[in-house]
Image (spheres, coloured by chain):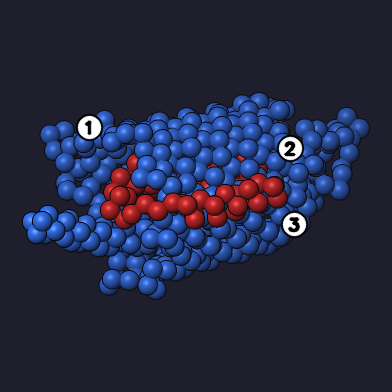
Chain colours: A blue, B red
Amino acid sequence: MQRELRAGAAVVVKRLLFSILFLSAIVKSQDLPVDEIQATINGYFDNFGVNILYPAVSINKNIGEKTNFNARYMVDVISAASIKSWFKVDGVTSATKGIHGGGDDSPDEIRHEFTAGLTHLFGDISLSLNGIYSTEHDYTSKTLAGSISIPFAKKNTILNFGVVRSWDIVAPQTRFWEKEKNVLSLSADLTQVLSTRLVMQGTLYYSKNDGFLSDAYQVVPTLFRASVLYHEPIHPGTRERKAAGLRGSYLLNDVSSIQLGYRYYTDSWDINSHTINILYQRYLTGDITGSFGIRHYTQSKSFFFKEKYLVPEPLMTVDGKLNEGTTNEFEFKIAFKGESLIDVPVLNNFAGNNSELSFKLNFFWRKTATPDWHSRRLSLFAYITSIGYRFKF
Amino acid sequence: MKKLIVILIFSSIMLTGCVTVQPWEREKLSDPIMIINENPLEKGMFEHHIDYREGSTGATGAQSGGCGCG
């Protein structure tokens, strides 16, 4: 009897010790990121002639037990970036066909983005504050983002509230003006552990946009006495955007999981959209992870979008992303833990404990209801590639 | 939209009250393949492209700055 009691007590003590240790790990992993350096080289290439290279480097470092510092630097090098390549607008109502930009392989735009932030734990509650500064020759954006994360019910429930405020300045090289754009976004997430295999997350999102909300390099053509006139697009000065999403992650077995997500979106410009995504992930070996994802998106057009305008109207746009359309996207990713690369030539330079090398390819296919105003194509095909290296220290 | 929000909030409250998974039973849930948006850097850059090519945004758990003119 005494032996049984002692054995029972030992089990209780073991469980208690394990739960304390594991709880600490959960606190660490959920509330403070691990110390990590990450570098990625990304590429975007589409059939509209846009090519982008955007390397990025980031660091997460814990300062003491309760504070984490993060920083990121990213640069976009864009060739044939935009539609500005064909139209040099005179700044009022008309444009002439330009010959500069887009016709060669030299970069048309370089954008730098800097991010820095702190996360601090107040007991179980974590508070984060991040600043983002993005600059390029014709666009500047300053963003402040704050969030608070509150766990409940033995950390089976986590409530997160976020606020993002950004101040942008648009100064296109083909216009004579400079305009502002301001965005305020609020979000609330609830993450719930439902079983030892299932986690669900619900998100509510609200955003209010004011100021210059159109693309400064697009032009709207109209036909006047057999000649084409080009006008600046005119969008409403405000936009209210709302979205609700539900995501779930389910452990299929010891080596694979599936994530399912759905989002509904609506806004004051009459765009309604549905997004469904599925991501299957699997350990191919102990050190190699493979994943495959599909994303399907469909949206209605904004109330002022038209393929063609006969005469100038109070509101007008030909912007493809405000058109009715669907998107299908396919994602493939493979990630190698450092130890698995020791015997592989070249890649063994990245081998090491606590490191990971990954390769990712996305194929993006957007089809709009009417042809794009500039390329006259219905479909946009894009390849998005990424090579990433993560090192935990 | 309002119906969806009410359903989300109501189901969340209901689910919160009826589930207790002990900390020592959550080992598998902390595996990288189970974490939603496991790599925020990667997710943020993906959203950055999407924002410029689709008319919707938000409720994805990712954020990025700049005009995204690419």
- The image's mark for residue A238 is 3
The chain ID associated with circle 3 is A
Whether residue A379 can be seen here = yes
Whether residue A321 can be seen here = no
The residue at the point 65 percent across, 46 percent down is B4
Q: Please state which amino acid type lies under the numbered disc 2.
A: Lys
Q: Please state which amino acid type lies under the numbered disc 1.
A: Thr
Earlier-in-chain disc, 2 versus 1: 1
Disc 2 and disc 1 on one polypeptide chain: yes
- The image's mark for residue A301 is 2
Earlier-in-chain disc, 3 versus 1: 3
Q: Picture coordinates of residue A207 (x, y %)? A: 65, 57
Earlier-in-chain disc, 3 versus 2: 3
Q: How far apart are marks 3 and 1 (CA)?
A: 51 Å
Disc 3 and disc 2 on one polypeptide chain: yes
Q: Nearer the viewer, residue A374 or A392?
A: A392
Disc 3 and disc 1 on one polypeptide chain: yes
Q: How far apart are marks 2 and 1 (CA)?
A: 46 Å
* Quadrant of the image occupied by residue A229: top right
Task: Name the residue carrying label 1.
Answer: A285
Q: How crowded is mark 3: few (under 14 residues within 10 Å), some or many (20 or more)?
A: some
